[in-house]
Image (tube, grey):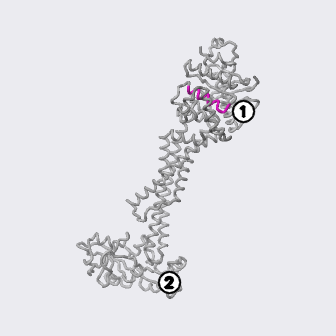
Amino acid sequence: MELIVLAMKDILRRKGKSLYLLIAIVIPVAILSTILLTFDNADSALSNLASKFGFTLIVQPKNVRVDRINQIGVNTQEYIPEGVIGEIEKIIREVIRNPKEKVITVVRLYKEGNVLAGKSEVNSVVAGIDFKTELEAKPSWTITSGRWPMGDREAVLGGTYASTQRVSVSDTVTIGDSAFTVVGILQNYNSAEDYMVFAPFAEVQKLFDKAGVVSVINIQSASLDKDKKLLQAAVEDINKNVPNIMALSPQQFSTMKYTLLKKTLKFLVAIVAATIAVSIFSIFNIVTSVLYSRVKEIGLLKSVGASRSQLLIIFLSEYLTIGLIGGMIGYPLGLLMTYLLDSFLLKLGAGIRVNLFYVPVALLVGIFCSFIASFYPTYRLSRIKITESFRTQWEG
Amino acid sequence: MSEFIETKGLKKIYHVGGQKVEALQGIDLEIARGDFVVFMGHSGSGKTTLVSTIGGLTRPTEGTVLIEGNDIWKLNDKQLSHFRNRKIGFMFQSFSLLPTLNVLNNVVMPAIFSANSGKKDSDTLKSKAISLLTDLDMKRKVNSFPSELSGGEQRRVAIARALINDPEIILADEPTGDLDIRTEREVIDIFCHINNAYQKTLIIVSHSLTWLEKAKTIIVMKDGLIFKDLADPVEAIMDGVCKP
């Protein structure tokens, strides 16, 4: 039998108190794991979104808050004059220095307005797009039924929009005074586009009296996709030379969102810190009460030759083992909580990733909580005088 | 018998509720190797304090405790723990055994604290523990837990534990305090056996006269001082320091 075995037998003997300690450790570890895993998922969802977006570079009016990548240019009264498109393309050409490379420029005009769809008129986001260039840049864009528009008075609808308004292919939607035949229904991409009406760009400009302006310019370039330094240079040059616009890359957008997430994370870390503090306080109280109920046992161990350091080893082994078990339970519990949070609340859609790096983090946090809370009472009790320990009224 | 334990000017002062209580008022004492000493006296006479000071459990306020000429109170915590572990086997009236461990592990327990520094073979220790338990007629209970044992059986286990590291001194504070007369006699006989067969120095604190028949030396304490050496046990009864 060794000191550690003695400690393990004590854990099993005090099942109730050990369970309380375990709960006090599992809670902060599970919360921490949930936050870290959720943060990871959000980051992953963001990256997926950015990569799925399909464009290398986005140009939007300056001073417009960027919230969602698929909503850039939506719900804003700011527009970009069409005249800058050539200027932007010129800058990109200068940066990539390859006259043969095909650079695709896709413009969109977003406008909110009443649309008669099916039997009811609803306020909708109408996106004016050039279907041909849009599909050239985004060949993966798919319609689930119908076809892509070929005429001026044809439109396609976002999947959710069509289903909520009960509009199908061949029906008519009326934007302002103009009727458009629905020729296709888009696949849902879990984005703002699922709720939009897509009509030919020039028609939307006319309908909303927005000739000569666009909401957003999307650019696709293979060179810029491959070389992040070139992309960065293009973004900087555009922002420097073209007034009243803001160019950014989807990666930059991710970074911006990442920064936002980091800020959120700071708040969440504060919550974790508070949870850990409460946990340490609870563990401290439990350990103190348990140890004071064991003073006679401590006296007995000392009388048969246990030194202070050996007592510290026995008791700290007990509490650190519970901390370790707490970490081992806390992480999968955090994983479960992340899954539930994502399934029922956040719906990030990135899937839950089991980040193994967080396993040692969870274990260390469990051990840390346990150590911080138990060291002082353990140290104090290891120094108790033997004769005093036998006089105590506490009973184990 | 050669001189073995010596105390010089041993004083112990407790501060209780702002008042000084002199538990030991300068004890000079010599105990020979292989002696069987029983300390008697009223409650509060200082006998437990004296014995625990000799055993390295209570630090004296003044004076020295010499075991084989070495002042044990000059040792640091680790050395003193080692001294308690190797030189002394303790027995207490209550809370002698750890409830989490079975009889065998309770007996082996002191050895794990020395094994930690000396790497003893656990099988050898277990064999020795079983041998001691057999000697004390407790072999059949090696896997029992303390809660399953009678008072007398618990004392036997505590005695086996006190002997596991083969200490030279056995210190027992009221080892038969809560036992019936028959069991008390059995336990005292075991102590006699230990004294005779193993040549251990026994230092016992007790109120019970039953010890008087067996002890080689009887020391009566009163008010923190050694009252007198008893030649006649009846005298102790007359002095009212022992229970008849």
Q: How packed is label 1: few (under 14 Cα within 10 Å), some, or many (20 or more)?
A: many
Q: Which of the labelled discs sits on residue A10, or is there none?
A: none
Q: Which of the labelled discs sits on residue A92, or is there none?
A: 2
- Is residue A303 shown to the viewer in this render? no
- Is residue B74 shown to the viewer in this render? yes
Q: Is B162 colored magenta in this rendering?
A: yes
Q: Look at the picture and state if A335 lies above or below A99.
A: above
The answer to which image quadrant residue A194 occupies is bottom left
Image x and y of residue A111, in percent: 34, 77
In percent of the image, x 28 and y 75: which residue is there?
A115
Count how many numbered circles sit on residues in the image: 2
- Which residue position holds label 1? B72
In percent of the image, x 47 and y 64: which residue is there?
A261
The answer to which image quadrant residue B40 occupies is top right
Q: Look at the picture and state if A3 lies above or below B242.
A: below
> Which residue is most to the bottom?
A99
In percent of the image, x 28 and y 78: which residue is there?
A182
Q: Chief secondary structure of the magenta span?
A: helix
Image x and y of residue A104, in percent: 44, 83
Image x and y of residue A301, in percent: 61, 35
The residue segment tinted magenta is B153-166
Q: Amino acid at mark 2?
A: Ile
Disc 1: host chain: B
Horizontally, residue A96 falls left or right of residue A181, namely right
Q: Amino acid at mark 1?
A: Ile
Disc 2: host chain: A
Q: Is B134 colored magenta in this rendering?
A: no
